[in-house]
């Protein structure tokens, strides 16, 4: 049906994919929080507050609000699909430039804020970056090449491979 270089698009995520990505995300955020808390409880709470609030108020409505998987494929990489559907209303596939900026700021906050405190603890610093890079690399090198979210700016599926594929 397609040429030898055609990549099969994902209709959902395996339990292994969900488990690994969820653990990597939780682990790098936990290591970041631990590194901050070890140096300053106040800044540890600030980091947790920033990460939780940016995920809830920036990532969920922007990225997750446009993702077709919870609505059209009854699956989600980060939360149970039913919970995601209750938390976020589907807003169609198109993501605005402002929403891309919001997602970028949320990611930068999660990754860059703990660096000062992590630099004081080399084992935590290295652990944080190993986990964060493993998490972040899974998107451009695997998931974004197979994703059905056509409106996402990170989607790397060649448009020719989408010909004849049903719209999510």
Image (cartoon, rainbow, N blue to C red):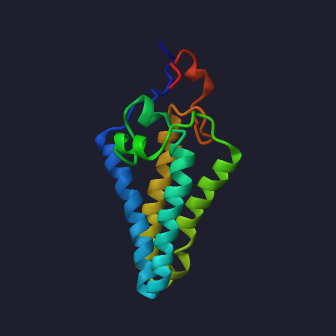
**Residue 104 shown left or right of residue 21 in the figure:** right
* Camera-side residue of 133 and 104: 104
**Residue 167 shown left or right of residue 123 in the figure:** right
Q: Going 54% across and 61% down the picture, which residue do you hit?
A: 54
Looking at this view, name the residue that lies furthest to the left.
15
Q: Is residue 134 above or below residue 79?
A: below
Q: Is residue 31 above or below residue 68?
A: below
Locate residue 28, reporting x and y percent. Answer: 42, 65
* Camera-side residue of 19 and 105: 105
Locate residue 80, reporting x and y percent. Answer: 34, 44
**Residue 56 shown left or right of residue 24 in the figure:** right
Q: Quadrant of residue 106?
A: bottom right
Answer whether residue 122 is visible to the viewer in this image.
Answer: no
* Camera-side residue of 27 and 46: 46
Locate residue 90, reporting x and y percent. Answer: 51, 37
Locate residue 164, reporting x and y percent. Answer: 54, 15
Q: Is residue 130 above or below residue 9?
A: below
* Camera-side residue of 156 and 100: 100
Q: Going 48% across and 27% down the picture, which residue do you hit?
A: 7
């Amino acid at each position: 049906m397609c040429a030898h270089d055609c990549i099969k698009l994902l209709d959902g995520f395996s339990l292994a994919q969900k488990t690994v990505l969820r653990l990597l995300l939780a682990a790098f955020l936990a290591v970041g929080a631990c590194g901050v808390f070890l140096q300053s409880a106040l800044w540890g709470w600030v980091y947790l507050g920033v990460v939780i609030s940016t995920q809830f108020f920036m990532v969920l409505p922007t990225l997750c609000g446009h993702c077709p998987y919870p609505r059209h494929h009854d699956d989600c990489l980060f939360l149970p699909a039913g919970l995601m559907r209750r938390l976020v209303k589907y807003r169609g596939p198109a993501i605005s430039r402002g929403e891309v900026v919001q997602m970028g700021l949320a990611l930068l906050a999660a990754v860059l804020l703990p660096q000062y405190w992590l630099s004081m603890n080399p084992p935590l610093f290295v652990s944080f970056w190993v986990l964060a890079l493993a998490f972040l690399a899974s998107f451009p090198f695997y998931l974004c090449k197979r994703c059905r979210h056509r409106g996402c700016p990170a989607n790397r599926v060649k448009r020719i491979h989408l010909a004849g594929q049903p719209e999510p």
